[in-house]
Image (cartoon, rainbow, N blue to C red):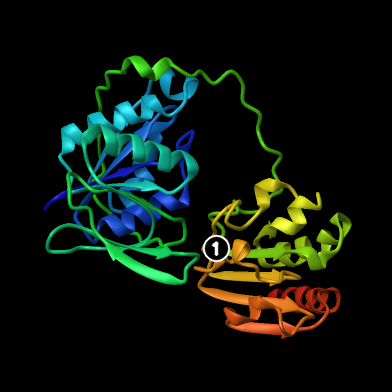
Amino acid sequence: MAEVLVFVDHVDGAVRKPTLELLTLARRVGEPVALALGAGAAGTAGVLAEHGAVRVLTADAPEFGEYLVVPKVDALQAAVEAVSPVAVLVPSSAEGKEIAARLAVRIGSGIITDAVDLEAGEQGPVATQSAFAASFTTRSRVSKGVPVITVKPNSAAVEAAPAAGAVQELVVSFSGQATGARVVSRAARESTGRPELTEAAIVVSGGRGVNGAENFAVIEALADSLGAAVGASRAAVDAGWYPHSNQVGQTGKSVSPQLYIASGISGAIQHRAGMQTSKTIVAINKDAEAPIFDLVDYGVVGDLFQVVPQLTEEVKTRKG
């Protein structure tokens, strides 16, 4: 069977969930071959094999940690030459899309970004995308070269499928551009204990209606009761009520969780562009004419300061 190359997103050997989703999608097209780079790469083999990787290519060198994306592109290009895959799948993060774009240029192939589904086709993998703020759904395939496809987190359910997962070391020759931009320092982001926004199965977001930074405690309490990530609209971020790293929308992050709860968010197109592909959307807003109600599955017309605390208490009661 044809092989599909999957770029592994991991932190010191801990594989992140979007990679496991890619392995699930890759099995629809062929046999997944995973590529893990950097410190802890060899330690990823076990979990990758559990989720369908027939082979795990690894490479570790100082360049992967000390410089920006080019060393990873060099390694991915070497893997493409070694494997001759029918497609290359990359997580659709900011870094992942840059790596994918650089690879596509190098190997002379077409690229599809932010896919939300993938299936086998007679002439190659067919990707589904949401376009124009999720107003349209498109299905497309790459017509030239090896398809390079980035896939948004939460696009597929993770499915275990034990495979051999044989570990093979990949020999990488770094290009002259690999050391062009050095990472001079790193600072760990303060942990909130909540899931990463773009990977969370549940997201609770607050907007202008929260009416102040101190009132985001109401949003955080609901999120914590659900084990969810916290998001914010652009209006809330611009007002300084919540960090930009939590902004959901066209100029923030795109999320596609199983459940999205929008509290005090009117539903401007800028915000909708970042969350409209969520599987189930719930809105809480005291304005019955708010645009957000046009796309929700469930809407609650009411004061969020009354509704959200009651919802939080109900969740806590049902959980235990």
Where residue 136 sits, quadrant-wise, is bottom left
Q: Which residue lies at the image location 46% right of the left edge and 56% below the top edge?
A: 153
Which sits in the foreground, 202 or 176?
176
Describe the element under mark 1 as helix, strand or loop.
Answer: helix
* Percent of width and height locating residue 21: 39, 56
Which sits in the foreground, 229 or 15?
229
Asked whether residue 22 appears in the rendered view, the answer is: yes
* Percent of width and height locating residue 56: 28, 39
Q: Quadrant of the C terminus?
A: bottom right
Amino acid type, callout 1: Ala
Q: Which residue lies at the image location 62% right of the left edge and 57% below the top edge?
A: 248
Q: Which residue lies at the image location 87% right of the left edge and 59% below the top edge?
A: 212
312 w.r.t. 53: above or below: below
Where residue 26 sits, quadrant-wise, is bottom left
Q: How many marks?
A: 1
Q: Residues within 10 Å of mark 1 (few under 14, many from 20)?
A: many
Question: Left or right: where does residue 130 sit relative to residue 104?
Answer: right
Q: Which residue lies at the image location 28% right of the left edge and 53% below the top edge?
A: 52
Question: Left or right: where does residue 166 sit relative to residue 159?
Answer: left
Question: Left or right: where does residue 69 sit relative to residue 229?
Answer: left
169 w.r.t. 108: above or below: above
74 w.r.t. 219: above or below: above
* Percent of width and height locating residue 115: 37, 58
* Percent of width and height locating residue 236: 76, 57
For mark 1, what is the residue?
Answer: 273
Asked whether residue 201 appears in the rendered view, the answer is: no
Which sits in the foreground, 225 or 263?
263
